[in-house]
Amino acid sequence: MSYIRVSGTKLVDGNGQEIILRGAGLGGWMNMENFISGYPGCEFQIREALADAVGKEKSELFFDKFLEYFFQDADAAYFKSLGLNCIRIAFNYRHFEDDMNPRVLKPEGFKHLDRVIDLCAKHDIYTVLDLHTAPGGQNTDWHADAGTHIANFWIHKDFQDRTVWLWEQLAEHYKDNTWIAGYNVLNEPTDARHTRLVAFYDRLYVAVRAIDPHHTIFLDGNTFASDFSYFGEAWRQWDNTAYSIHDYSLFGFPAAPEEYKGTEMQRHRLRRSYEKKREWMDQNKLCVWNGEWGPVYARTEYEGDRTDAINEERLQVLKDQLSIYNEDRLSWSIWLYKDIGFQGMVHVSRSTPYMTLFRDFLAKKHRLAVDAWGADTAQVQHVYRPLFDLIEQEIPPENQTLYPWPVWKLDSRIGRLARNILVSEFLVKEWADHFVGKSEAEIDEIAKSFAYENCLHRDSLNRILRDNATLVKGI
């Protein structure tokens, strides 16, 4: 078994044969996310709140069992049955060190990560290790688990020092594991100055390579893996490195600019957006990996009779993106494998203890649009409109385009702060209080809701993935 490595624009095996990685992200697991598993705010907030509500032992039981049930042998077997060959595993630094005890490795962090890597290897599935959450928050969104819209990672050197230290521990632990396709060292950075990211990558590359000269390193572009314009000639210093774009299309979300019908103009916009993200790599003949992409889906409890029509439209976006990727023999990792019904390839059944317990709470979250990802703000837009109008009237237009513009336009930025940080903070205790009075056996059953046998398949999506997984010769 040989390491996967970069050769020119391709990923290859030890014999130099091209390998195209086709798979999904295991998100919402070792880095929990609100829209994936149904809580408000950030992971560190619900962990603290649950411990306050039911005590440390029951809280730790829930989270440990959640990790155990979320991905097991049946998940790996199903994933492989679709012809997919790689899982990108998102993880949170907090599994490996505490903010109040930095640079002291928590060996228990490897418990579930090792287990899932080995399960995937058993089924001939490669894994990519994705540091989705770094100390201080490397980006401005909820999935950086910082509880703020400021990416403090870029303005406090110690956060960067700790991240280098963590990757040294990970590289030492995994350097001999050839089923790991590579290290995705920092998910979706947002460095407002742009140059600090490249300097950090330089430093991290040297540190990892001193321990592990073999594994491929995957580097996300700046501004949520979309912008390589400041990378310049840095690639000349980085051997065996691939570059990760995240190719989400607005057509696949509730805020789409228009109905997607797959017209020539719309397909041109899909391709242009994708080509713009990979332009720097193409200019320098470098290897590209699409680390995240994919639409979200309507749910009958919220969209009612319109659900099937909406999802048919979203799946057409997906198919048109895949046709582009197939032409370019692109490796990709769709977002995501499992959730509670918004985007996952499989999703927790509404009849499970977890979904039953949180049914009304999830409806409230949806109504208040407290999750940023794919939010439908229709029921609360009138509440925030006066705030939008105030800022538009009182702030000069040139001062309204704050980074990460244009990914965050004005209404998106206000929504991030007002709904997704402020309002969600008031819902954290309410989420945790659902567990009050539950026995350990009941808590185990709630966590077990996320087990494969308690999940449903999104067959319309999975058929498309299966049909495209081996469509390109060379997998």
Image (cartoon, grey):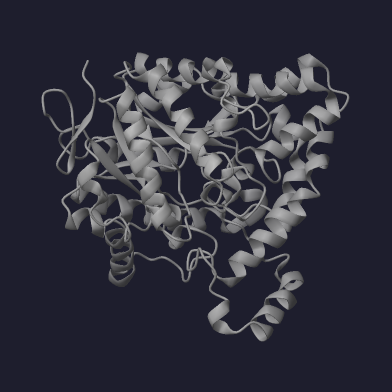
Note whether 131 is above or below 272 in the view shown: above
Q: Is residue 464 visible?
A: no
Relative height, residue 172 to residue 135 (above, below) = above
Outermost residue on the front side: it is 157
Residue 326 drawn at (x, y percent): 22, 47
- Res 326 visible: yes
Mark count: 0
Q: Is residue 149 left or right of residue 272?
A: right
Identity of the residue drawn at 76% across and 70% down: 383
Pick the front one: 232 or 223? 232
Q: Quadrant of the C terminus?
A: top left
Give how far across and how far down residue 35 sits, in percent.
61, 45
Quarter of the image that includes the N terminus: top left
Say left or right for 181 vs 372. left
Instruction: Identify the residue at image location x=68%, y=37%.
Output: 44
Residue 176 screen position, x and y as percent: 31, 15
Identify the residue shown where x is 45% and y is 61%: 193
Residue 215 or residue 427, whichever sits in front: 215
Quarter location, residue 410: bottom right
Q: Is residue 429 left or right of residue 391?
A: right
Q: Point out the residue furthest to the right here.
A: 437
Where residue 340 sits in the image (x, y, percent)?
61, 38
